[in-house]
Image (tube, helix red, strand yellow):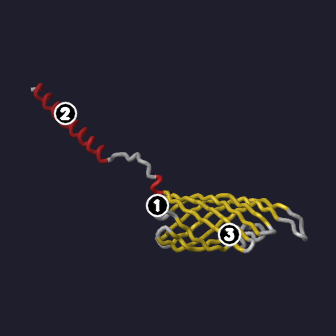
């Protein structure tokens, strides 16, 4: 009788182990680890181009940027800025630098932004009858807070430089409109 009991117990143990292993293998098939990289699926590229030409005045700028969409509401990104400004018989200026940006879309149509920009300004002033020629080279830091209306990949809005200094700022005003496009 002991031999029969042992045989039945081994069969039961075998059935239990077979069920556990088969359940485990089925469960592993349902939870496949996805090692593919989806980083680039969440990246958008954009930026700006500027060209202003007038009577003795030239303004050329190139500002590429990229953002990473963390989710549907939040995105972070970086940008570069290169520019050339010239006023005939007055000055030539080169501007270059970078920025980091954070974007928040509380609803799809509204975009709030914060952008920290650091640019180097190299300006050579021409001599005039009232002053000799000289150079002015400095770093300019700006912290822009903005809001805009977003439709698709285009946002139209305004931003304000909370660090604006009329004596050293790159622009004539702390307030400026913008058009932001990301593809």
Examine the rendered structure and indicate whether residue 30 appears above or below residue 90: above
**Which residue is painted at 29% across and 44% down in the image?**
29
Numbered badge on residue 71: 1
Examine the rendered structure and indicate whether residue 5 appears above or below residue 42: above
Q: Secondary structure at mark 2?
A: helix
Examine the rendered structure and indicate whether residue 164 appears above or below residue 80: below
Nearest the viewer among 118 and 96 is: 96
Q: Specify few, some or many for label 3: CA neighbours under 10 Å numbering under 14, 14-19, or 20 or more.
A: few
Q: Position of residue 148 (x, y in %)?
A: 55, 73
Q: Quadrant of the N terminus?
A: top left
Q: Position of residue 118 (x, y in %)?
A: 68, 59
From the image, tell me which residue sits under label 2. 14
Nearest the viewer among 24 and 168 is: 168
- The answer to whether 78 appears left or right of 28 in the picture is right
From the image, tell me which residue sits under label 3. 162
Nearest the viewer among 18 and 59 is: 59
Q: Verify CB contact (< 8 Å) between mark 3 and mark 2.
A: no
Examine the rendered structure and indicate whether residue 22 appears above or below residue 93: above
**Which residue is painted at 67% across and 70% down in the image?**
52
Q: Specify few, some or many for label 2: CA neighbours under 10 Å numbering under 14, 14-19, or 20 or more.
A: few
Q: Nearer the viewer, mark 3 or mark 2?
A: 3
Sooner in the amino-acid sequence: mark 1 or mark 2: 2
Q: CA distance from mark 3 to mark 1?
A: 27 Å
Q: CA distance from mark 1 to mark 2?
A: 48 Å
- The answer to whether 79 appears left or right of 106 in the picture is right
Q: CA distance from mark 3 to mark 2?
A: 73 Å
């Amino acid at each position: 009788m002991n031999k029969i009991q042992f045989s039945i117990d081994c069969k039961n143990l075998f059935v239990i182990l077979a069920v556990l292993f088969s359940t485990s293998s089925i469960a592993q098939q349902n939870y496949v680890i996805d090692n593919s990289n989806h980083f680039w699926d969440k990246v958008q590229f954009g930026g700006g181009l500027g060209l202003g030409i007038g009577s003795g005045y030239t303004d050329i700028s190139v500002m590429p940027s990229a953002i990473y969409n963390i989710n549907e509401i939040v995105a972070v990104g970086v940008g570069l800025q290169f520019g050339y400004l010239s006023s005939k018989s007055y000055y030539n200026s080169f501007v270059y630098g970078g920025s980091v940006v954070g974007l928040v879309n509380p609803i799809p149509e509204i975009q709030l932004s914060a952008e920290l920009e650091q640019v180097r300004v190299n300006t050579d002033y021409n001599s005039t009858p009232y002053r000799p020629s000289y150079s002015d080279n400095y770093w300019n830091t700006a912290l822009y807070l903005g809001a805009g209306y977003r439709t698709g990949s285009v946002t139209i809005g305004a931003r304000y430089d909370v660090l604006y200094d009329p004596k050293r700022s790159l622009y004539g005003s702390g307030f400026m409109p913008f058009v932001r496009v990301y593809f």
